Amino acid sequence: MLKKCMYRNRRLDDTTSHRDVHNSSIITMMELSYENEDKTLLRQFVERGYRTAPLLHINGQPVPPSLAAQARPNQTLLSYLRSTLGLTGTKLGCGEGGCGACTVVLSAYCPRRNTLLHQSVNACLFPVLACDGKMITTVEGVGSWKKLDVHHSSASAREKDDNLHPIQRAMVDMHGSQCGFCTPGIIMAMYGLFATEDGEGPSRVSHLEEHLDGNLCRCTGYRPIWDAARSLCVDEGMGVVRGPCGVPCRECPEREVCEMECNVREREGVGSMDVVHSCTQRKVVEFRKVVDEKHGSDWWKQPMDMFPKELLPTTENTEIREQLSKPLVVVDSSIHNGGTWLQPHTLEELLDLFRDYAPAEKGGIKMVVGNTEVGIETKFKHAVYNRLVHPKESIHSLYEVLETESHFHVGACSSLSALQQFCHRVLHTNLATDVQNDTALHKKRTAKPIHDMLRWFASTQIRNVACLGGNLATASPISDMNPLLASMNAQIVLASRPVSDGGIERRKIAVKDFFTGYRTVDKKDIEVIERVDIPMVSEFEYVAPFKQARRREDDISIVTSGMRMRLSPSEHSWVIADVAIAFGGMAPKTVLANKTMAAMLGKAFEESTFAEARAVLQHEFRMPDDVPGGQAEYRLTLACSFLYKFYLHCAAELKKDVEASASKDNFPAVPAIPSDEESAIGGFVSAPKPSIRGAQSFPAPKVATGLEATHLAASNAESAKVLASPKEPSKLDSVGQPATHASGPLHCTGEAAYTDDIPAPENLLHGSLILASKCHAPLASIDITPALSIPGVFGAYTHQDIEKLGGDNRMGPILLDDVAFLPVGEKVEFVGQVLGIVVGASQEIAEKGARAVVVEYGEEEAGNAIVSIEDAIKAGSFWTDFRHEMKRGGDVYHILSQTEVDGKPLVVVEGSIRSGGQEHFYLEPNSTLAIPSESGTNLTIYASTQAPTKTQDFCARVTNTPAARVVVRMKRMGGGFGGKETRSVFSSVAAAVAAKCSNRPVRLTLNRDTDMSITGGRHAFVTYYRAGAVVNDDGTVKLHALDVKLYNNGGCKFDLTGPVMDRALFHVDNCYNWPNFHSVGTPCKTSQPPHTAFRGFGGPQGMVITEHIMDHFAIKCNVSGDKLRRDVSIDVYPLNHRFGANLNLHVPLLSQNMYTLQDCTPFGMRFGDNFTGKWNVPSMYDQLYNTLDVPGRRAAIAAFNAKNKWTKRGIALIPTKFGIAFTAKYMNQGGALVHLYTDGTVLVSHGGTEMGQGLHTKVCQVAAQAFGIPLDDVYVNDSSTDKVANTIPSAASMSTDLNGMATLDACRKILERIQPIRDQLPPNAKLSEVAKKAFYERVDLSAHGFYALDNDRCGYDWNKDRPEDFPVDLPENSWKGHPFNYFTQGVALAEVEIDVLTGDHKTLSADVIVDVGSSINPAIDIGQIEGAFIQGMGWSTIEEVVYADDDHTWIRPRARVFTTGPGTYKIPCFNDVPERFNVSLLENADNPFAVHSSKAVGEPPFFLGCSVFFAIKDAVTAARGENSGYFEFRMPATSERIRMACGDVISSECIATEFSTFQPKGSF
């Protein structure tokens, strides 16, 4: 099907350059069109009864025909909602259905069930034209924060407080949003689950636990979202919180011994009002009262009430009914070349379309149902399908799921959810007569494996629209369902109609024979998969599904399998009469293990048979080291482990059947399963999903005085007296209160605007970056001509255009070693380096133009590109000027060469530890809107950035615009985590260049895969260590010396790599005192993208080293790791080892491995008093150790492990201290601008940015407290460089410390000015009255505030030598500075369970206590702790960044990052949260070094999530056995690393090398 470009008003000939285009009059999209040859067929389709316009309904209302006509065949629903209808509450997070930010609810009448169906779908994949005749509900249609009462029509009508839906209200009240970008999608996912079809009311908790699996949140840690969801469920005892005894809580006579976490925590606080306790159960009860009061009992009926009556079959609107009865054809003639959409209503029509158009010579045709695979192909593989056909649900044979006596018949287009629900109904059908019992049992055994596998198939949103036929036709080699169907002897029914007036021809083919190669199948072009026939299992026939992925929920499998076996009794044993074993992930297609099956057939059903079969399986499926997908040994191990699990499953089921049989005495004996192996039966695939609950406690709210008492001095004594006078607690107190996030209601209604949501300015252009496709070679040329020939492309800009602007192409936060656009002739440093930008009339056109640019490269440089740290070490590729070293005490090399210290044995351990990188995965990709004005001499930049001033600086430099003419504005970010501190700037610069050159607004929003490919992430570290500890006479172990060499992978540009390494060096001691210490940090330069700041900024990478060493010592010294961390002994040491002075005095001291008061860090900071404040880690460690009975927990775990061979548990108690301050002294400053208005409200602008951390909320609380006004009377609009200039990035957890103090400084200035006015008014005068009088008295009601951290409490000079006159009583290295103002501290205890046979793990519990000072907002602080914990848990467990390096040669080109989206990179999801997640804020922890005695909280808890990693390591140690000794367990603890470290016979057989030296591959 040929198409040609048509310009209605003008044509660009080949001689027109893009420079000429800029000066020509504007070409709009409406002026451009394509001539789609299918337009000539329209008449034929109309004559055959087709209509040509869709009927779309959004939020209960019909879409006007003029707008409906703009829906294109290849357009997603998300694109249509945002670009055509302006409904921006639905977000673009990934574009592949993997994050859920785009979730909407699709409602339709189902004639087969005579009911309305409401299902959540991914709008980023679902075609807009597939919504024809249905209703779409977006978050805007659910509820609104502010809305006129619908019962009043006049504009002056009384305004309601809000129009929130109960789901939205629950999310707000329970602090379920932070950055808010994911929140609308989560709201809609819940909305779809609560919109039940049975008319019995809201869902039960178990239903939500099963199906809330398609959304990701990077901020909250999920626990508050779970609480919000639970609060609306109709569930057992939901109205009253009951304990295990069934008695309502607080009424139980055994309350004093009840061990429910909520009761234990409340009981601890009985008699004291100093602690606030909360838990899931209590919040649920309290919120139910709110729902009943505000919303009544029928709130869940909203989707039914809103559904348009004209779409029901009973409608009296005959015109609509007539239109919907016709098939649909839409031919796109727009500039987007969207092809043709066909929606037939009968099977004959569908088959005729395939006959007429499916052959390639006729243009081809592609069937789409949910578009879950085709959408991926078109977006990421850039596939072009000229014709798309979407069968109407009226084709019953395609959509029905039926059962007969012998089969399940599944329509090829029926959704996977429909199949899952069908199986669920079969499984829950009550058994009747004995005859029916047998039939029902066979049905259940047929349905159960299908149901169980579908539970974990993608997500609810995908399952709701994806179909089984599409899954089969796609022929993915790692499909979950295809191996299961193959093993069950399922057959595919293919239909065709070769002759237009002939009948339908059908042929059958077994699923096992359907797949002919990699993504190829035995299907003719004119054939359509009509249905799948699945035979019922028979007596003594068993089927089991198996799956292992990187993450349990919403993840493609590493290996998946379906296994079926039929057993027959013989005289002496059970015999394998039939067997089918199918795998996905073991070959380029779904395959049967034919050799293994042959080895089993006819053999006795016993363990030895399976052991022999395992040997055959290993030979049959052993893969080469460079197999695509990697993980060769692990995949083989999984296949063998699944086989063994299947044996145990069949043995257990057979035993049940024999025992239930009336003829059980006539059967041979069933192989016995040892009791310690029973835990291997099943696995997570068939297990119920966990219930997530938690408890929180924090000190009772108070208004504490902190640094402001001494730092913000009043200008006169009278003002000082007023400002410093103690105030009684007031209901207007804001500081210390658990206020909800200031933007929470807007998050939950979709009314919070992000950069990409800003309405399009007139003449807006969309941008797409031109990226390098390889590296390690010079850029030879860039030809933009092909891009400019594409209709709708306005221009393309490269380095040459920056030169013409007179701009400075250099960039970089520390070193100017980066460029905006790479000049021709220079070396391409990394795959994805930015070469330029293409701008066009739409995002799709700009992307098409960028792909059309022809880029040529010169010859590759000699040798391979340096990708890993090991590569850099071999090549000596370092930033040597930033290699830093820290020494304390004696010569560690000499010390560690000894065997004794003062006659006591010195135990020395040596090894290495690797920690991987981490992708930020902020839900909102980098986005910029650059608007030129005044003929391009001014620029306004709306950017999603943590660093407005840095963005301003480089946009000004590169475009040659004075900084005063560049304004950067930032309202809110959808997450940042450090990733938008420096690595957001280049995208803003690219947009600014395009805007300046074109003199038109330019929007540049990166696709998720582009963002992840080029922005870098957390630095991977490789560390080599030697450490020594003294074993005392009493058996205690005292840390003595540490020598550690750290290397981090900085990528190809310096960015912040040096400072990240410095912070790692500052934290490598964690909480432990090493008297003799030596560390060296070397930043490595590689061909990866520039790596950058990430929550923790190197601190976690440093702390994990010491915790690994502590575990090493525990094994080497045969002591408990818990005891080692807190060992207390009497030792004789020089005083300088404790105080840091060279006193050469030896005295007996009470020595601990954990720091105590007056101890000093290796960098010279002393603990306690005026140095760092309270040192609380030891007491918090002891508190958790004792109150949670760690010794008892360890004993119980040991007992569990002894009874379970294939399931092991582990526990870890891990402390942290995190230094608070920028290590670069100049950055420790903040500014604010405060306006007091005459109505008594306050507007605050400050230098920080809001990314979900609640900074604006806390700043508002500080200002409200200062003025004594309600919190709602204070507002922060946005962060803007024309309000507060020369700002510091929001980073280092310092934003509240700096900007809160600056805001308070400004508030106090205003308060001083108005105090004389206040004195003239009555004592109870309102602030509005004071302000108004002050205004008339010509008093300035605006003030600029500023705060800078004291010189002696920040900054560190690594190269400064010790001054000759430095006092001997001060700590060693303290002459170099005082890098941190104070430490935020915490301790976490985590307990996990691992599946030894698969490597799967789950976190059973996590208890966290953190010292955050006197919290300004305990709810926000707890949210930060939970979010940081889960993010740290993700980094250390499932989040694995993979590059094309020596370990992954199957990825090309070399140095390309492979993990570029949710499909390949897995962050924790709802199911990964600790099943019991308890968080406490430490009491009596005032901090005199920050505003209102608070502490920073954003980054410090991150490392506590690594307690899960160390608990997994503890479980793996148990699996390896008592004599396994030390092993390097690399981070992250993926399922592969867990499985392959367990050391059982199966994994050992599958490892080609020596097990003791084997390490799974990784990118470090």
Image: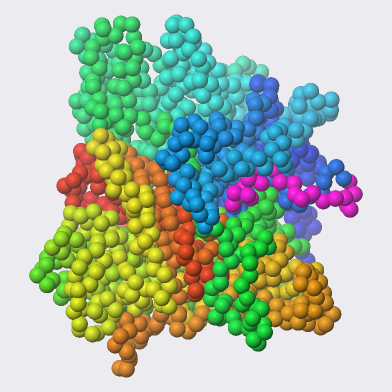
Please, is residue 594 above or below residue 1521 in the view? above
Q: Quadrant of residue 1325?
A: bottom right
Residue drawn 52% across and 27% down? Answer: 420
Residue toward you, 1449 or 162:
162
Residue 701 % position (x, y): 57, 60
**Rendered residue at 27%/76% (across/down):** 1138
Residue 859 or 475: which is nearer the viewer?
475
Of 52 and 173, which appears nearest the observer? 173
**Majority secondary structure in the magenta region:** loop
Q: How is the image coloured?
A: rainbow
The residue at 26%/70% (across/down) is 1074
Q: Residue at x 29, y 41 (%)?
A: 1196
Q: Is residue 167 magenta?
A: yes
Could you tell whether 1417 is left or right of 630 in the image? right
| Residue 817 versus residue 433 in the image, above or below | below
Tell me the magenta residue range.
153-175
- Quarter of the image containing the C terminus? bottom left
For this view, does 1304 lie left or right of residue 647? right
Residue 1343 placement: quadrant = bottom right
For this view, does 753 lie left or right of residue 1416? right
In the image, residue 1302 lies at what x, y percent?
A: 61, 76
Q: Give coordinates of residue 1011: x percent, y percent.
A: 52, 59
* Residue 1491 visible to an observer of this rendering: yes
Q: Is residue 1451 left or right of residue 600?
A: right
Please say whether residue 967 is visible from this viewpoint.
Answer: no
Question: Which of the image's four quarters has the N terminus?
Answer: top right
Residue 895, magenta (yes or no): no
